[in-house]
């Protein structure tokens, strides 16, 4: 069983820059063909201040932290037993190329199913731009297959 006393743990916040090339690469990786997400002139002509981040991009920012998925170390989890359960996003503003985003995450909840064979870890993240504006929130649920 994973240590449920860790629920409520706040991870160290970090900031990362959103680069045009990363947005273009991500758009291509998810099969986004709308040039709004890859061409600055098209984005500006559509009224955006720069290339906007495609939907689901905030998850990429989670991986920019100083540690790869710090919840793994906190709960002493074997990455080979971790499955992606779900991901939900709430968009409160826009993320643009050139922004600096601060990511803050908390271990929100833990529960199990199948008599403890599957443990669920619920992470909540918030994404704030360089102007102090909360631009997105995410809830990520990991599934851990217990040994």
Image: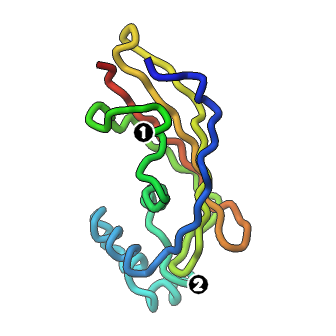
Answer left or right for 41 relative to 124: left
Q: Which residue is mark 2?
A: 49
58 displayed left or right of 30? right
Residue drawn at x 52%, y 25% is 110
Using the image, tell me which numbered label, if any, was put on residue 72.
Answer: 1
Dot 2, crowdedness within 10 Å: few (<14), some or many (≥20)? some
* Upstream in sequence: badge 1 or badge 2: 2
15 left or right, relative to 117: right
Image quadrant of residue 22?
bottom left
For residue 99, what is the image quadrant? bottom right
- Which numbered mark, 1 or 2, is in the foreground of this view? 1
Image quadrant occupied by the C terminus: top left
Identify the residue at image location x=41%, y=52%.
Answer: 68
65 vs 40, nearest the viewer: 65
Please state the horizontal and vertical placement of residue 84, each as a whole percent of the image: 35, 38
**Label 1 secondary element:** helix
* Residue at figure coordinates x 48%, y 70% from the top left: 53
Q: x, y (%) of residue 65?
A: 49, 59
Residue 138 has which mark? none
| Mark 1, other Cα within 10 Å: few <14 / some 14–19 / many ≥20 | few
Label 2 secondary element: loop
> What is the CA distance from the residue labelled 1 to the residue labelled 2?
37 Å
Query: Is 20 drawn above or below residue 12 in the view shown?
Result: below
**Residue furthest right as drawn:** 132
Indicate whether 124 appears above or below 147. below
Give above or below for 105 relative to 25.
above
Residue 64 rendering spot, x and y as whole percentages: 45, 62
């Amino acid at each position: 069983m994973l240590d449920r006393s860790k629920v409520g743990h706040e991870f160290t916040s970090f900031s990362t820059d959103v680069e045009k090339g990363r947005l273009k690469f991500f758009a291509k990786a998810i099969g986004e063909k709308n040039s709004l997400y890859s061409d600055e002139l098209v984005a500006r002509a559509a009224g955006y201040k720069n290339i906007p981040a495609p939907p689901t991009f905030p998850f990429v920012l989670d991986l920019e932290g100083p540690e790869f998925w710090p919840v793994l170390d906190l709960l002493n989890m074997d990455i080979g037993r971790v499955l992606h359960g779900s991901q939900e996003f709430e968009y409160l503003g826009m993320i643009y190329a050139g922004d600096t985003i601060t990511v803050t995450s908390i271990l929100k909840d833990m529960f199990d199913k199948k008599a403890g064979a599957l443990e669920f870890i619920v992470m909540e993240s918030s994404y704030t731009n360089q102007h102090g504006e909360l631009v997105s929130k995410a809830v990520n649920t990991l599934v851990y297959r217990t040994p």
